[in-house]
Structure formats: structure tokens, C-alpha cells
Image (cartoon, rainbow, N blue to C red):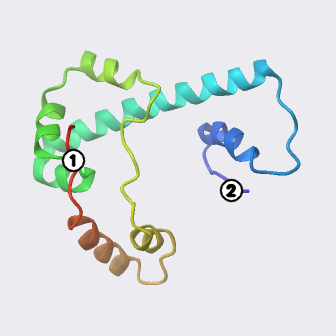
Amino acid sequence: MLSFSTPKSDNLRFFLSFQTSTMQPFTVMEVKMKANELTTEIKDFNLTYLMLAQQMVIADKDMAIFRLGISKDIADILEVLTPGQILKLANSNMMLCRIRFDDNLVFGMLANYTKDKLMVQSHTAILLAGQPVEEIS
């Protein structure tokens, strides 16, 4: 089983526990409580992500577009969001960002780096730069 280093990620253990063969049965109330806690964690994460993304766009839009993997249109929207709008967007039970590593090679390079971490990061940045940014559909 994977172990996470932050106490806030204990909610993720709930989902990982389904993969074990020695699982203790949960009551309906426990499952509902865990789901509510997970939703709260997602909302907190969304708020943190949006605030960081906006800060990055304001500081250096081109760098933010590259690092966040977003389009210029999304960057323009993030730049002008008010705190109230950010709170409203963050209050979703869906993650507002996603892992960009659809490619096993990129994910493997980042997860299993060896001694030369700087070289792996450079190669990964080159591979990610070749991927198209996300667009609003």
C-alpha cells in the first residue's frame, strides 16, 4: 500500500483500502463521512491551485502558460478573476487541474529519477513543451 507523508492525504487511504484483500467493511455512515471529507479536500486543493495559478499568471504569463499547461485564453481569464470568483470556482467537487503526464515516458522519468535529477527535469520539460496546451471546449 502507498504511504503518504501529509495528514491531509489520509482521505486518499480510504480509496486505496478498497484494493486490499483484508478490507474491513465500512458502514454507510462511514463511507458518507469519508466522501464528505474527500470533497472538502478537493475544494481546498482547488482553492490553492487557483490562487497559485493566478499568482503565476500575474507574475509572468508566458512562464505560467508553459508550467501550468494552459492556453493564453485561460491565462487571461485567471489573471482577472476576483477573489469571489476564485472561491466560487474552487467550491466544486471536481478537481480543476489534472495530471498532465498522459505519457508513460514522462511520468516514469519524473517518478524514477536517478542521480542526475537536473538532467531528467530538463528532458521532461522538453517533452512537455511539445504537448499541446489544454483548450476550453
Residue 16: percent from the left, percent from the top?
Answer: 70, 47
Asked which secondary structure carries label 1, the reply is loop
- The one nearer the camera, 43 or 31, is 31
Q: Quadrant of residue 92?
A: top left
Q: Is residue 105 left or right of residue 58?
A: right
Q: Is residue 50 left or right of residue 7?
A: left
Rendered view: 29 above or below 108: above
The crowding category of the residue bearing disc 1, from other C-alpha atoms within 10 Å (few below 14, some 14 to 19, many at least 20), is some
Q: Quadrant of residue 25?
A: top right
Which residue sits furthest front? 137
Q: Mark 2 = which residue?
A: 2
* Mark 1 vs mark 2: in front: 1
Image quarter in which the C terminus is found: top left
Q: Amino acid at mark 2?
A: Leu
Asked which secondary structure carries label 2, the reply is loop
Q: Amino acid at mark 1?
A: Ile
Say whether disc 1 or disc 2 marks the residue closer to the N-terminus: 2
Label tally = 2
Which residue sits furthest bottom? 115
Image quarter in which the N terminus is found: bottom right
* Residue 70: image tag: 1
Q: Tell me the residue at 63%/26% (across/down).
A: 35
Q: Tell me the residue at 20%/38% (across/down).
A: 136
The span from disc 1 to disc 2 (Cα, nearest Å) is 30 Å
Q: Tell me the residue at 46%/27% (across/down).
A: 43
- The one nearer the camera, 90 or 48, is 90
Q: Is residue 54 left or right of residue 107?
A: left
Residue 73: percent from the left, percent from the top?
Answer: 11, 39
